[in-house]
Every structure is written in C-alpha cells, then in structure tokens.
Image (cartoon, helix red, strand yellow):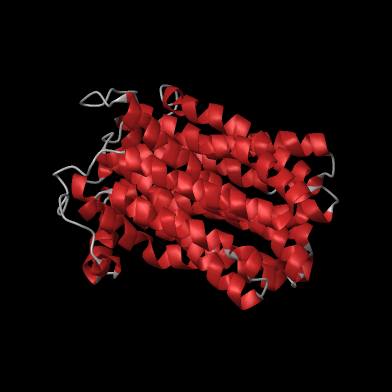
C-alpha cells in the first residue's frame, strides 16, 4: 500500500480535528477498559460470570446500532452525528458513581458504550468522507488513536488511586466534551451525501432495515469481507485487554497505576508502529501483513499469565501494542477504498458491529472458562481458539491473499 497524497490538500485545522476525534474516542475506550473493571470489582464484588456480563454489556447497543449510526453519517455527515452522541456521553459517565447497582451499571454500560463507539465510527468514517481513504492519513489517525493507549492509562490509573471513582468518571465526561468540541471544528458535510444540507431530525435516530441490508450487501466485496472477519479476531484481543487482563493484573497485586503503565507501554509501541504500516507494505503485501499482525496480537495477549514479572509484562504489552497497531491503518485504508462515497459509514458500521458482537460475547465466554479453569488458563484457551480461527480464515481467504500478491 503505497503512500499517496489526498486528491485535494486538506487544511491542517481539519486534519488535526479528525485526529483529535480519533484520540479522544479511543481514549474513552481505554478509560472504560481500565476504570470500569476496577470499579466493578471493588464496588460490586461480583462473580467472574457477572463481571463478564457487566463488561460485555458495553458492547450490546454498539452491536445493534453501529450500522445505523454509520448510515446516519452517510446521510447527514459524521460531524453532526458525533456531536450528538458525544454530548449524551458527558452525562452518562457522570452517572456511574451514583448508580452502584448491577442493573443500573449494565444500562449505563450499554449507553456509554454506544456514545463512545459512535465517536470512533465517526473518526473512521471521516477517513473516507474527508480524506478519501488516503493511507498516510489513515496511519496518522491510527497513531493518534493509539496515543490514547500511552497517555490515558497512567492518568486514569492515578485518578483511581488518588481521586477514586468520581475522579476517573469526571475525566471520562471531560473527554466526551472534548469530542463535541473537536467535531464542531470539522467542515460541514459534503454535498455528495444524501441529506448533507438537511437538519437532523428525531426520526433519524430510528434504525431502518434498508441501512442494514445495504451494509450487509458489502460482504459481497471480498476485500471487505476479509477485513471484517479478521477485524473480529483482532478486536477480541482488545476485549480481553479491557476485561480479564485488568482483572488478572489486579489479582496478582498490581495497583491501578501499575496497570496504567502497562497499558501505556502498549500505547508507546503502538503509536510508532501505526506510522510504519504504510512503509512495511513496500516489503509485505497489505493483506499478508494484516494476517501476520493480527496473529502477533493474539499470541501476545495470551502470554501475560506466564509471568508475574512487571518488566516482562511491559515487554509483552509493547509487542501486543505494536502488532495490534500495524493492522489498524491497513484495515481503515482497505475498507475505505473498497466502499463508495455513500457507503463509508455503513462499511465502518459493519466492521464495528462485528467487533462489538464478539466483544459482547467474549467476556461472558471467558468468564465461564475462568470459572472452570481459572483466570490464567482462560488466556491460553481463548488465545488458542483465536489463533486456530485466524489460520482457518487465512485458508478460506487465500484467493484474496493471492490477488493482493499479484497487484
């Protein structure tokens, strides 16, 4: 995937706003992945299965509505949709410390997951709507997003240690407000979109069957189908990292600050690796590199239970971060170039839907495995299943891999 310039120069102000939405939205995901498991375990003291249900609930509404949100962005532009959902996110995350009941937490998890996911769907949609799938901008957005892995964990970990739950959730609300401001700076929607100049109406938030049918029709494009499926496997490593990875580390005696630094180590390596993805495709074809990177992410997320050494855990975290990061710009670029201008949001929504479905199921499944085999062994069992699935997908996708090698 050679680096290319966008068809028209994109103002620096717009570029920075797009990258800011990526940083802020993925930062919110990182905050939730660290703060909420700690808060749930300490405040509610539930069983592993209930922990899995609570953490998986954050992906329930995104699983159902990501395609609809992407379709809204195709019709109205990502800017307005992102602003609306991020504004709701401010209030939702301030309600967590006020609702220490399992039922209420599950509802807040679903709403919080939806608002955060829609911001990230919007960031990726902007790569197609504004930056036309340019791999250079895809790499920069990926790097900006992954900087959240570097900067946020120490902040939220220290907030938990020194300011408690209120400090952590207030930071999450502040970041949601930042997404509103970053989206406000973006230009108005392009006239290429169906209702670019129309106002947002209440009925726009109601899902439409046609949007889902159009999104699932994108599976007919082989490259999109492969990216969606491999993205599911990649995203499961994030689901592990945002759930039982934190539970395991807390169980071996690490503090919130320690866990934050481990996650920052992944962000440090990931932010740099994302910028190298385009250059690496000069030596390895994009689809092949995508499979190799996701394979690495699966292997490294399964290794932490092999050691209790903090420094070895940092090395493992950095290897996982680099592997996961290299795959992100490849997926963004392949997806945006394979879909037309009116399907950018639906394409992103399709991939996010598949990701969130796996992220909803995985914590519950891993919790059940942990009940039987122990938390540490569950990493090896789930990791082995994921790796075998990746090998099977590579076998089924060999025609797409072969065509990429000829191009």
State the quadrant of the C terminus.
top left
Q: Is residue 334 left or right of residue 142?
A: left
Residue at the spot 49% in from the left edge and 42% down from the top edge: 24
Residue at the spot 39% in from the left edge and 54% down from the top edge: 351
Residue 297: x and y, percent? 59, 43
Q: How many marks?
A: 0
Viewer-closest of 13 and 366 = 13
Residue at the spot 31% in from the left edge and 31% down from the top edge: 134
Viewer-closest of 128 and 235 = 128
State the quadrant of the N terminus.
top left
Residue at the spot 61% in from the left edge and 70% down from the top edge: 105
Residue 118: x and y, percent? 40, 55
Q: Give the quarter of the image for residue 349.
A: bottom left
Q: Give the quarter of the image for residue 258.
A: top right
Q: Is residue 24 visible?
A: yes
Viewer-closest of 56 and 221 = 56
Residue 281: x and y, percent? 42, 26
Viewer-closest of 394 and 49 = 49
Q: Is residue 368 visible?
A: no
Residue that lies at the very extreme toward the bottom in this rendered image? 103
Residue 192: x and y, percent? 14, 45
């Amino acid at each position: 995937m050679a680096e290319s310039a966008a068809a028209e120069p994109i103002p620096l102000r717009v570029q920075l706003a797009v990258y800011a939405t990526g940083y802020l939205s993925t930062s919110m995901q990182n905050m939730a992945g660290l703060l909420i498991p700690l808060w749930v375990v300490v405040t509610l003291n539930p069983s592993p299965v209930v922990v899995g249900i609570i953490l998986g609930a954050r992906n329930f509404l995104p699983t159902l509505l990501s395609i609809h949100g992407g379709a809204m962005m195709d019709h109205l532009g990502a800017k307005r949709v992102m602003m609306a959902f991020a504004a709701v996110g401010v209030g939702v995350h301030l309600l967590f410390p006020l609702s220490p009941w399992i039922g209420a937490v599950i509802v807040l998890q679903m709403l919080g997951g939806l608002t955060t996911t829609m911001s990230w769907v919007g960031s990726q949609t902007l790569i197609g709507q504004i930056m036309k799938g340019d791999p250079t901008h895809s790499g920069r957005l990926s790097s900006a997003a992954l900087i959240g892995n570097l900067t946020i964990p120490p902040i939220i970990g220290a907030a938990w240690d020194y300011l408690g739950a209120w400090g952590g959730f207030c930071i999450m609300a502040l970041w949601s407000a930042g997404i509103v401001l970053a989206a406000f700076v973006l230009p108005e929607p392009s006239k290429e979109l169906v209702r670019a100049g129309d106002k947002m109406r209440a009925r726009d938030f109601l899902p439409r069957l046609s949007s889902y049918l159009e999104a699932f029709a994108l599976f007919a494009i082989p490259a999109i189908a492969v990216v969606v499926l491999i993205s599911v496997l990649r995203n499961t490593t994030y689901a592990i990292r945002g759930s039982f990875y934190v539970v395991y580390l807390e169980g071996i005696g690490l503090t919130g600050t320690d866990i934050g630094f481990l996650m920052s180590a992944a962000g440090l390596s990931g932010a740099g690796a994302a910028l190298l993805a385009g250059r690496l495709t000069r030596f390895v074809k994009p689809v092949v590199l995508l499979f190799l990177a996701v394979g690495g992410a699966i292997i490294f997320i399964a290794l932490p239970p092999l050691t209790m050494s903090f420094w070895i855990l940092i090395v493992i975290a950095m290897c996982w971060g680099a592997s996961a990061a290299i795959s992100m710009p490849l997926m963004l670029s392949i997806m945006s170039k394979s879909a037309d201008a009116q399907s950018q949001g639906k394409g992103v929504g399709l991939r996010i839907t598949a990701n969130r479905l796996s992220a909803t199921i995985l914590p519950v499944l891993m919790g059940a495995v942990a009940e039987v085999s122990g938390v540490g062994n569950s990493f090896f069992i789930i990791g082995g299943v994921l790796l075998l699935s990746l090998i099977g997908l590579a076998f089924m996708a060999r025609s797409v891999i072969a065509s990429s090698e000829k191009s």
